[in-house]
Amino acid sequence: MATQVIVLNGGSSSGKSGISRCLQAVLPDPWLALSVDTLVDAMPASLKASDAGIDFAPDGRVVVGPEFGKLDAAWTEGIAAMARAGARLIVDDVFLGGAASQQRWQKALAGLEVLWVGVRCDSAVVAGREIARGDRVRGMAALQAEVVHEGVVYDLVVDTTHTESLACAETIATQVRR
């Protein structure tokens, strides 16, 4: 069976978005790239910096509330429905709950051919990228660098510490079943 979904999991500033764009360029068929950032951007302002929605604490922690959970569950099921309808998808996510986050995705994507990819990067490097980006709470990337991988099982792991997005995408593309 051909790969229908590529799930990229890694902490903030690990390089997932760059890899997604490169995958779209190197894979022969059209793939849609969807990110948890898209979900957060689509949320109403009232759920940003909110106990009910999502809050980015000054120390870099990300705290999610019940309303975010409901929207995230709908988002996940919607992505699965798109794949079942024939879209090939690259999902860029941050498994704040480690293995529990993967299990939620596994349940939603049951019956689909999924390539699970861990995107790792040294915490000092992601901290530098975070500062350069200027749009993230300082400390978030370093806090997430390892915790998002705890208990998660991958088909493939790439490391962007010293490897460019295009090289990572080319490595991932070799594992995509056509």
Image (cartoon, helix red, strand yellow):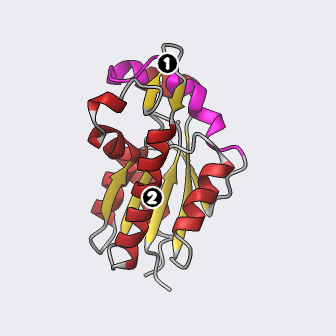
Q: Is residue 73 above or below residue 45?
A: below
The magenta-colored residue range is: 130-150
Q: Which numbered dot is residue 153?
A: none
From the viewer's side, name the closer residue of 124 and 50: 50
Q: Which residue is mark 1?
A: 57
Q: Quadrant of the C terminus?
A: bottom left
Asked if residue 131 is positioned above or below residue 34 in the image, the reply reads above
Residue 145 located left or right of residue 29:
right
Note whether residue 93 is visible: no
Residue 100 x/y as whole percent: 66, 50
Q: Position of residue 29 (x, y in %)?
A: 29, 75
Which amino acid is tagged 1?
Ala
What residue appears at the point 59 percent right and 33 percent down from the top-left corner? 145
- Give whichever of discs 1 and 2 has the lower sequence position: 1
Packing grade of label 2 (10 A; few <14, some 14-19, many >=20) is some
Q: Amino acid at mark 2?
A: Thr
Q: Secondary structure at mark 2?
A: helix
Can residue 51 be seen here?
yes
In front here: 110 or 18? 110
The residue lying at 53 percent from left, 29 percent from top is: 63
Going 31% across and 53% down the picture, which residue do you hit? Answer: 21
User: Nearest the camera: 151 or 159?
Assistant: 151
Which is nearer the eye, 73 or 118? 73
Q: Which residue is mark 2?
A: 76
Q: Residues within 10 Å of mark 1 (few under 14, many from 20)?
A: some
